[in-house]
Amino acid sequence: MYKAVFIDVDGTLIRNDHSVSEATYDIIQKLKEKNILIVLVSARPLSGILPIAEQIGLLSYPCASLNGAYISCEGNIIFNSLIDIEVAYNVHGYLKKYNATEIYYQQEYWFSEFKNYDTDHEQKITSVLVTIQPFMETLEAWKNMNTGPNKILVISEEKTINEIQDILRGKFIVELNIATSKPTFLEIMNKQASKKNALKLLMGRYNIKREEIIAIGDNFNDKEMIEFAGLGVAMGNAPDEIKAVADYVTNSNNDDGVSLALKKFIGYDI
């Protein structure tokens, strides 16, 4: 019997127009009635997840934001993983050589050196306004407060993202968890922060076994979570590599993939 469902947001829970389908909404209500734990696990900051959680009635459930680097429930922090500030300095030194947008996240706050199409796009999914200032100023302020970012997001063309990913993985394999959430988005977190580790942490917190968990996602930052869960589900819109590690491939996010998978394996009609 499954006791928990971990669901990615973009490309999984929500459709390309950012809406939640009626079928997905209904199946989530069925899971709630059966006291199944439902966790939204997203690369988004918490402020980008909570409006969706409110829409589908999950505000009292834990949310794993920033790829599992910041986990909270009803305002209470469960997990807060930071990138070491010296590592962040060094990463910035590599990134500034490229034509790429850098965004630094700390909890619900986010920072960029300039506004552009990428920051405008990210602003649409969060109510927290971006802080525009030089990254060295942001990093120095964090250093003085003995803190750092939860996540660094790099946005660029796919070829550049692949090159940056290869370089950073070679330089920071011990310190950082690095994965793409889409071909043009590179997600950089502390090594302890991942969707898989969020799943493991909440497993222990709620006394749920691995085989009692369903995880659903669509991209490379979901891969470990899908592999680890008792039942790993890949969306129909996922890359072939993600489909290959899943136990089951469902429909796309635009074709009720989440609700169809949950009805198949949990067995509730809606």
Image (cartoon, rainbow, N blue to C red):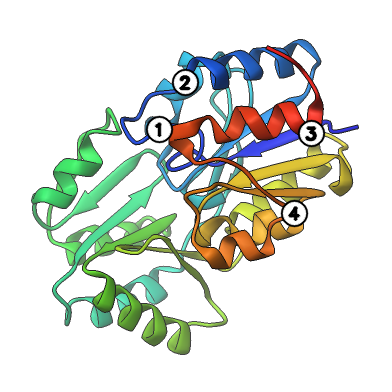
In the rendered image, the vertical position of residue 247 relative to residue 139, given as above or below:
above
Q: CA distance from mark 3 to mark 2?
A: 19 Å
Along the polypeptide, which appears first: circle 1 or circle 3? Answer: 1
Residue tagged by mark 3?
A: 265
Where's residue 24, x and y in %? Answer: 56, 22
Q: In this image, 262 relative to 186: left or right? A: right
Say if residue 144 shows up in the picture.
yes
Q: CA distance from mark 2 to mark 4?
A: 24 Å
Q: CA distance from mark 4 to mark 3?
A: 11 Å
Residue tagged by mark 4?
A: 247
In the rendered image, the vertical position of residue 187 relative to residue 206, given as above or below:
below
Q: Amino acid at mark 4?
A: Asp
Along the polypeptide, which appears first: circle 1 or circle 4? Answer: 1
Q: Amino acid at mark 3?
A: Phe
Residue tagged by mark 2?
A: 21
Along the polypeptide, which appears first: circle 4 or circle 3? Answer: 4
Do the CB atoms of the residues marked 1 and 4 lie less than 8 Å apart? no
Q: Quadrant of the N terminus?
A: top right
Q: In this image, 42 relative to 99: left or right? A: right
Q: Amino acid at mark 2?
A: Ser
